[in-house]
Structure formats: C-alpha cells, structure tokens
Amino acid sequence: MSRRDISTLSVIVTGGARGIGRAIVERLVAQGARVAIGDRDDAVAKATAEEIGHGVVAAHLDVTDAASWASFLSEVESVGPFDVLVNNAGIMPIGSLLKEPEEVTRRIVDINLHGVINGTKAVAPGMIERGSGHIVNIASVVGRYAVANGASYTASKFAVVGLSESLRAELAPQGIDVSLVLPSIVKTELSAGVPDSRGVKPVTADDVAKVVEATIRKPKAEQWVPRYSQSMMKMTGMLPKRLQLAIAKSMKADSVFVNADSAARAAYEERARES
C-alpha cells in the first residue's frame, strides 16, 4: 500500500483534550490534517483546540452515549467527512478488583470498550459509503499481557484487542483499515504513581503520537510502543509459564500496578471516577 498524505485527511480524536490524545492532535495538525477533538471535558477540549489552532475544532462527546456521538458528528461536520477515527478516550483506575466499586468497574468498561464500539458504529458507516477509511484503536500492552491490580482495565483492553481483530476482518472488504496501537506505561496523568518496569524505556505521549502518525500514513494491523516490547513479549510467550513469571518478576513488570503510589494517583483516580 502506498503512503497516505496526512494533509488530505480529516480525523476525529476522542479524548483529545489532554495526554496522548492531545499529542496525537498536535502531530496530525502539524502534518496538515483537519482534526476534530471529541472530549467530555468541554472547557479543556476547547482550550486545547484554541491553543493548537490551525482549524482544530472541539465539541462535547461522551463516548459511552450513542446520542452524544450523533450530536458530536453534527457539530463538527464542517471538518468532515472523516477519513480516520482515533479511538483514544480511556480511563485507568487501578487496584484490587475485590475492592473496586461497581460503578467504577462499569465506567471502565463503558468508556474503554463501549466507547470504541459506539465510535465505530457512528463513524464507520460513512467510511463504508465512501469505500475507504481507517479506524485506529488505542489499546495497551496489558491488552496482551495481564498484570495484578488492573483486572477491569486489563479486561477492557483485551476486549478492544479482540474487537479490533474482528472488525479488521469484517471491514477490510469495505476498504476500511483497522489498526491497534498498544503502548506500555505512558508518562501522562493516567499513569501517575505507576513505577517503571526494569529494562523498559519510559514512553511519552509524543512517542505514542509518532506511532499513530506512522500508522495512519501506512496502516498496519498492530503497533507496540516502544516497538521492541512486542518482540520481548513474543519471545517470553514461547517459554514455560513459570519462566515467564520469573522474568516478569525480575523486571518488576508483574507488580507495576500493585506498587503504584496511591497518593500520587489520588487526583487522577478521583477525576477518572467522575469522568
């Protein structure tokens, strides 16, 4: 497939007001794309659009609500029709599943999984009509590798991986690409207080944005951030389970959520619960 010219594309980025989403918007706009930010935090989203400029628009979007998607698309239709949908919105409350309030569990699944489903249902039909399009789903390394104290978050990202693989097969005949981007722990508010794994370079929001930009230019099914982490997972995945666990323990990869600093995460956890 030939490389796409990003300057010709119209793109939706959910959760684009801050963090990874904002970094994606900044990179795509720098390449000349027309971008619409969808975010539940109206004030921050509109401030972000004004700061970035270059025609970026922002509108209220609750990804868990199909009606909100319809309203959002109507409000940003001047930027469309949309060639690319980046399903980035997500939350990451962590802790013991047995102590997790029911409303938090439901919110994680609603935003991280149903948000992707709702976005796809809202935007993909227009892509099908035009015979082309690209859906980029931001998942997580924990969508392939589970760790303790993140059961609901991990389950939601495993689900996004499966959803994306199924959609890829379903939508390919319609000319639509579906890509997965799986970052490790990214240095944003979402990962506040979460320690690094040994041997894994810390990832920034812009590192993820670079990979999203490259994936839009030349669609690939799955991209990990950092890229070498995929090879590490594949190699250890061929080993007996006891050796996999021993390696994860030596890298402290099995306890990144268990050892998270709850005080450092307090502000984010509160905002995630109210999202």
Image (spheres, rainbow, N blue to C red):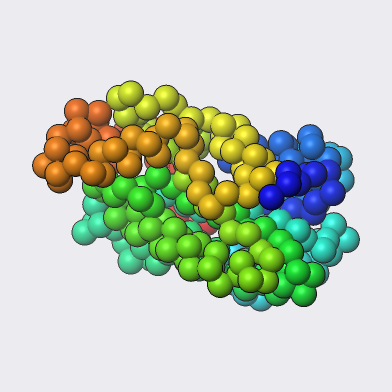
Q: Residue at image x 88%, y 61%?
A: 78
Q: Position of residue 249 (x, y in %)?
A: 18, 33
Q: Residue at image x 44%, y 58%?
A: 161
**Position of 69 compared to 55: left or right?**
left
Q: Extreme front residue here? A: 1
Figure check: 145 above or below 246: below
Q: Position of residue 168 (x, y in %)?
A: 55, 64
Q: Residue at image x 44%, y 47%?
A: 140
Q: Extreme left residue here? A: 242
Q: Residue at image x 37%, y 27%?
A: 200
Q: Is residue 91 visible?
A: yes
**Position of 196 compared to 213: left or right?**
left
Q: Is residue 72 visible?
A: no
Q: Position of residue 269 (x, y in %)?
A: 42, 46
**Position of 96 compared to 217: left or right?**
left
Residues 107 and 133: in front is: 133
Figure check: 234 above or below 91: above
Figure check: 63 above or below 13: below
